[in-house]
Image: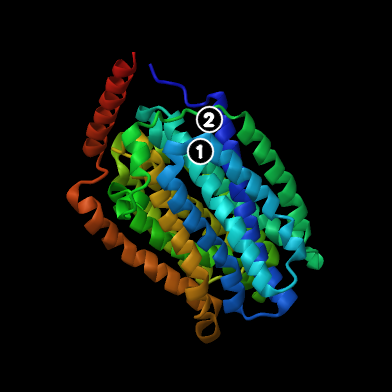
């Protein structure tokens, strides 16, 4: 008999994650437009104002992944949610670009800590045998947020009313904090050796080596996705297709939702290769279609392909990153995967944005498509070639993990 996924706490942590990401994605697009309109900075500088958020998130993810399972998952989630809410009013008083960037870093730190804690909690809540399916539903919150957030960012900025975004985000962050407080979280009982290990600083203290191969793929996918996240609004505006930009995110949300009905189960039943190769190709096709855009239909098709591409990569990648990981390192593996995705999203706007003056926005999307194209053989070399994440390998890891959990329970009795 299958264990249930849809428990009270699973629903709560999924909603928490969704709201965290709505604010993140909404303000990523908003910050670029706001910086250009308020301080008349260049596209590259506006991209930097957007991407420094990720710098704060990266620092927080590495620190949180190192300590979350030992110091307490709920404790870190609640504390980070408080900071996430408290940082929002600071945008009102950021009177120059340097202060704005500082606020973005602080806000990014709170986002990185809270989202890593939420990802760790769901990895502990979902039954091992249904992790692909469960994390797929959980990650649907990320995906819907990445569609709804930018949509809100565009619509609420209409007429130059930029602070409408902040008012709305304060309400969402307050709701997130309330849900974090009432969430019941499974905690890892840390041993004396694990507490002592917190004092040791090494590469393995901040990165789960087993999660690195899929995390590298996440990094390049993040670079490609950043071209959508940071520049689609300005690109659509340059084509006089602002409404088409909104349709893009609606199509993205719809297909992301539909894909969750089968990609998680495909992962559990057939392995990662069956899902990851088509997802990478869909992401590449999305970027090519957007690069050639000349009308609303291109944006709609691009949104559909992104829902089948990046949305699948982010959720399936998270599930794959914790396969075979002991309970005490779920947070570290989760952190490793999202650190690499966030790093890609962080460096993407600044590096790809530098190509806009020479090649225009279309050239940026063609360059991003090339990056995804090259990640396909990289996936083969790092993962598929050696049978990693094949269905047989995943079943072996699943049985081993279940045996370890059962052994731990017998010891505690």
Q: How is the image coloured?
A: rainbow
Residue contact between numbered discs 2 and 1, judged by CB atoms under 8 Å: yes
Distance between the alpha carbons at the discs numbered 2 and 1? 8 Å
**Compared to 75, does 154 lie above or below?**
below
The secondary element bearing badge 2 is classed as helix
Which quadrant of the figure contains the N terminus?
top left
Q: Which residue is mark 1?
A: 138
Residue name at image x 39 percent, y 62 percent: 220
Quadrant hosting residue 163:
bottom right
Residue 298 visible in the displayed image:
no
The picture places residue 387, in percent across and down from the top left corner, at: 20, 46
Q: How many marks?
A: 2
Left or right, 88 with reference to 369: right
Q: Nearer the viewer, residue 109 or 211?
A: 109
Residue 10 badge:
2
Residue 230, position as x, y percentages in the image = 58, 66
- Which image quadrant for residue 401? top left
Q: Nearer the viewer, residue 197 or 307?
A: 197
Sequence-first disc among 2 and 1: 2
């Amino acid at each position: 008999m299958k264990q249930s996924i849809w428990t009270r706490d699973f629903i709560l942590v999924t909603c928490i994650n969704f709201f965290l990401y709505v604010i993140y994605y909404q303000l990523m697009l908003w910050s670029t437009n706001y910086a250009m309109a308020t301080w008349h900075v260049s596209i590259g500088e506006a991209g930097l104002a957007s991407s420094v958020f990720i710098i704060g998130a990266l620092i927080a993810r590495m620190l949180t992944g190192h300590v979350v399972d030992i110091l307490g998952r709920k404790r870190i989630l609640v504390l980070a949610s408080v900071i996430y809410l408290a940082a929002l009013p600071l945008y009102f008083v950021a009177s120059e670009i340097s202060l704005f960037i500082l606020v973005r870093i602080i806000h990014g730190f709170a986002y990185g800590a809270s989202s890593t804690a939420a990802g760790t909690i769901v990895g502990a809540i979902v039954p091992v045998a249904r992790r692909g399916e469960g994390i797929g539903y959980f990650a649907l919150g990320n995906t819907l947020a990445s569609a709804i957030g930018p949509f809100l960012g565009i619509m609420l900025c209409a007429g130059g009313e930029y602070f409408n975004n902040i008012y709305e985000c304060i309400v969402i962050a307050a709701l997130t904090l309330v849900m974090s407080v009432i969430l019941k979280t499974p905690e890892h009982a840390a041993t004396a050796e694990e507490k002592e290990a917190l004092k040791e600083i090494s590469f393995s203290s901040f990165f789960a080596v087993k999660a690195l191969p899929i995390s590298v793929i996440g990094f390049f996918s993040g670079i490609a996705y950043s071209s959508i996240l940071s520049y689609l609004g300005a690109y659509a505006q340059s084509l006089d297709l602002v409404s088409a930009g909104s349709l893009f995110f609606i199509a993205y949300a719809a297909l992301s939702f539909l894909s969750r009905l089968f990609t998680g189960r495909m992962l559990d039943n057939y392995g990662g290769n069956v899902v990851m190769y088509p997802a990478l190709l869909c992401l590449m096709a999305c970027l090519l279609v957007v690069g050639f855009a000349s009308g609303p239909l291109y944006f709609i098709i691009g949104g559909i392909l992104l829902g089948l591409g990046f949305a699948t990569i982010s959720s399936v990648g998270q599930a794959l990153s914790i396969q075979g990981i002991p309970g005490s390192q779920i947070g570290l593996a989760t952190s490793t995967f999202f650190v690499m995705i966030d790093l890609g999203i962080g460096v993407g706007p600044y590096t790809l944005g530098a190509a806009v003056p020479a090649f225009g926005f279309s050239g940026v999307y063609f360059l991003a498509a090339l990056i995804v194209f090259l990640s396909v053989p990289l996936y083969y070399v790092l993962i598929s070639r050696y049978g990693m994440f094949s269905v047989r390998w995943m079943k072996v890891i699943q049985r081993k993990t279940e045996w370890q959990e059962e052994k731990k329970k017998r010891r505690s009795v």
